C-alpha cells in the first residue's frame, strides 16, 4: 500500500469533517473518492498533505508515518496535489510556473528548465511554454495546475476536481491525458463529481458522506450500491445509466 | 423581453464578443452553449452591466440598458447569479437573501419574495441563521439562486449553476430551473453541462470564440451533429 489512513478524524470546532476514516490505496492504481459537497473529500487531501493538522488517527505513506509533517516535507517525500482553485503566478510564463515546483528537486536552473519542459510535453502544454499564464485558456490552466503538481516529481498524485468547468468534449481530452500519466510508477487519487471521469479512470472508488466512508468497491459495484445512490448519485442517475 | 443586438465587447485589446445577437422571449428558458473562453460569462456580464459593450445595443422590454451601471440594471429587473455562487460567506442565509432584496422598496413584497424562496428551497429556511460560508456547495448554489430571486427579477441570468456539484444536487438544480420557469420566470442559462441545459431550454445559441455560430430550438440543437461532437462529447 502506498497510502493508508488509519482511523483518521478531523474536527473544526463542533463539526466533524472526517470521521474515523480508514482508506488504503494500492501502488500504481487510480483510486477515486466521491461524495456530496461537504462530505470531506478535500479535507482528506488537506490532511494527507499536511495542510491541516489531524485531530486523531494517522496517515502512512509507503509504510512511513507522515502524520504531523509539514506540507513541504510531505511534498519532498513524493506526494503532489492540485487545488480546486488554482493559484498560478499569472505574471510568469507557463514554463516558469512549472519550474518553481521543480526546485524542490533541484537547485540548478538548467536542470529545472529541462524537467519543466519534459512535464509540459507530458501534459501537452509544451506549445504554450513561453506564454504568460494570464493569456492561457481555462482548459490550459487546468493542464498547468496538473503540470505544477507533477513538477515536484510525485509518486502519489492527488487530483482535486481538475475537470470542473470543462465542457464534455474538453473532459474527454482530460481523461485521456490523465490515463497517459498512469505508468505504474505513479499512483493517483481522484476527487471528481463528473461520474464519466471517475468511471473511466478508477480501479477502486470510496464514497464519503458526512466524513464517513459509506462504500468502497470497484466502479460497477459502487454505482449500483443503494446507499451511494441515495446519498450521492440520485435515483435519476441510476435510471439514466 | 431581452434583446441583444450586435454587441462587441473587449477587455483591453482582447475582443471577447464579436457582433453577438441574442433574443430572450418572455417566459422562456434560453441557453448559451460553448467552450470555455467562448464568451458565455462575458455575455451575461454585459447584460448585467459588469462590463459594457463597445458597440451594439441591449434592450429590456424596449428600454436601452447597455449604458447603465449594474445596480440600475438590477433595479430594472435583471438578476445575475454569478458563476461560483459568490454568496457572502460571513452573512447568514437570511442576510444574504435580504441583500438580494435591496432593489425592492416595499417590505410586504420582500416578505412575499422571501416566502417564495423558502418554498422553493426549504433547506434555506431551516438554515436561515447559519452563515453562508458553512453551507455545503449545493446549499450555497440554492442560496445564490434564492438571492437572485429576491430582487423580483423579470429575467434571471444563471452562470454555470451546476458547477462542481454532486450528481444528485445537479438534478435538484435543474428541477429548480424547470420549477422557476413554470412559475413564469424567464431564464438565460449558461452551462458547461450542455446536454442538461439543452434538455430544459426552449431555445439555444452556440457561441464559439466570441462569435455566435448556431442557434435554434434546443430540441433541434441537441441532435445537431456539430453540437453533439463539439459540446456533448458524443
Image (tube, coloured by chain):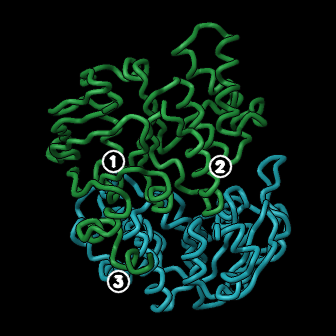
Chain colours: A green, B cyan
Q: Nearer the viewer, mark 2 or mark 3?
A: 2
Of residues B68 and B223, the one nearer the viewer is B223
Residue A50 lies, in percent from the top left, at 32, 27
Q: Nearer the viewer, mark 3 or mark 1?
A: 1
Of residues B143 and A155, the one nearer the viewer is A155
Q: Which chain is mark 3 on?
A: B
Q: Does B201 sit left or right of B65 as displayed?
A: left
| Residue annotated with mark 1 | A41
Residue placed furthest toward the top: A108
Residue B3 lies, in percent from the top left, at 74, 81
| Residue annotated with mark 2 | A139
Relative to A45, say whether B78 is above or below: below
CA distance for labels 3 and 1: 33 Å
**Residue plotted at (52% across, 55% down):** A164
Callout 3: few (<14), some (14-19), or many (20+) C-alpha neighbours within 10 Å? some
CA distance for labels 1 and 2: 23 Å
Of helix, strand and loop, which one carries label 3? Answer: helix
Q: Which chain is mark 1 on?
A: A
Amino acid at each position: 500500500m502506498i497510502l493508508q489512513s488509519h482511523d483518521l478524524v478531523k474536527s473544526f470546532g463542533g463539526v466533524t469533517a472526517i470521521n474515523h476514516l480508514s482508506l488504503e490505496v494500492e501502488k500504481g492504481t487510480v483510486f477515486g473518492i466521491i461524495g456530496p459537497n461537504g462530505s470531506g473529500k478535500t479535507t482528506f487531501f488537506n490532511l494527507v498533505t499536511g495542510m491541516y493538522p489531524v485531530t486523531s488517527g494517522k496517515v502512512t505513506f509507503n509504510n512511513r508515518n507522515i502524520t504531523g509533517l509539514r506540507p513541504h516535507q510531505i511534498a519532498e517525500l513524493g506526494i503532489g496535489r492540485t487545488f480546486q482553485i488554482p493559484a498560478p503566478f499569472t505574471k510568469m510564463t507557463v514554463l516558469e510556473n512549472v519550474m518553481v515546483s521543480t526546485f524542490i528537486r533541484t537547485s540548478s536552473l538548467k536542470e529545472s528548465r529541462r524537467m519543466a519542459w519534459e512535464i509540459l510535453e507530458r501534459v501537452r502544454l509544451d506549445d504554450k511554454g513561453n506564454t504568460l499564464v494570464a493569456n492561457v485558456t481555462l482548459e490550459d490552466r487546468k493542464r498547468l495546475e496538473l503540470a505544477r503538481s507533477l513538477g515536484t516529481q510525485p509518486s502519489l498524485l492527488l487530483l482535486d476536481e481538475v475537470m470542473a468547468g470543462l465542457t464534455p468534449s474538453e473532459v474527454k481530452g482530460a481523461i485521456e491525458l490523465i490515463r497517459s500519466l498512469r505508468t505504474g510508477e505513479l499512483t493517483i487519487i481522484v476527487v471528481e463529481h463528473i461520474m464519466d471521469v471517475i468511471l473511466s479512470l478508477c480501479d477502486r472508488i470510496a464514497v464519503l458522506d458526512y466524513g464517513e466512508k459509506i462504500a468502497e468497491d470497484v466502479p460497477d459495484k459502487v454505482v449500483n450500491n443503494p446507499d451511494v445512490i441515495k446519498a450521492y448519485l440520485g435515483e435519476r442517475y441510476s435510471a439514466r445509466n | 423581453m431581452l434583446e441583444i443586438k450586435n454587441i462587441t465587447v473587449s477587455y483591453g485589446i482582447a475582443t471577447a464578443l464579436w457582433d453577438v445577437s441574442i433574443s430572450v422571449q418572455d417566459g422562456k428558458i434560453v441557453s448559451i452553449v460553448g467552450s470555455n473562453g467562448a464568451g458565455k460569462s462575458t455575455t451575461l456580464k454585459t447584460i448585467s452591466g459588469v462590463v459594457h459593450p463597445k458597440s451594439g445595443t441591449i434592450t429590456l422590454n424596449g428600454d436601452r440598458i447597455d449604458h447603465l451601471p449594474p445596480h440600475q440594471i438590477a433595479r430594472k429587473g435583471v438578476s445575475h447569479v454569478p458563476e461560483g455562487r459568490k454568496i457572502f460567506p460571513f452573512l447568514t442565509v437570511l442576510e444574504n437573501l435580504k441583500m438580494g432584496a435591496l432593489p425592492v422598496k416595499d417590505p410586504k413584497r420582500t416578505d412575499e419574495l422571501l416566502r417564495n424562496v423558502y418554498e422553493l428551497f426549504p433547506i434555506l429556511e431551516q438554515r436561515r441563521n447559519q452563515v453562508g460560508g458553512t453551507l455545503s456547495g449545493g446549499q450555497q448554489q440554492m442560496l445564490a439562486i434564492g438571492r437572485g430571486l429576491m430582487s423580483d427579477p423579470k429575467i434571471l441570468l444563471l452562470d454555470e449553476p451546476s458547477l462542481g456539484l454532486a450528481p444528485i444536487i445537479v438534478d435538484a438544480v435543474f428541477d429548480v430551473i424547470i420549477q422557476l420557469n413554470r412559475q413564469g420566470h424567464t431564464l438565460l442559462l449558461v452551462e458547461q453541462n450542455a446536454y442538461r441545459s439543452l434538455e430544459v431550454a426552449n431555445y439555444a445559441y452556440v457561441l464559439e470564440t466570441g462569435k455566435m455560430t448556431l442557434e435554434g430550438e434546443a430540441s433541434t440543437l441537441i441532435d445537431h451533429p456539430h453540437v453533439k461532437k463539439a459540446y456533448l462529447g458524443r
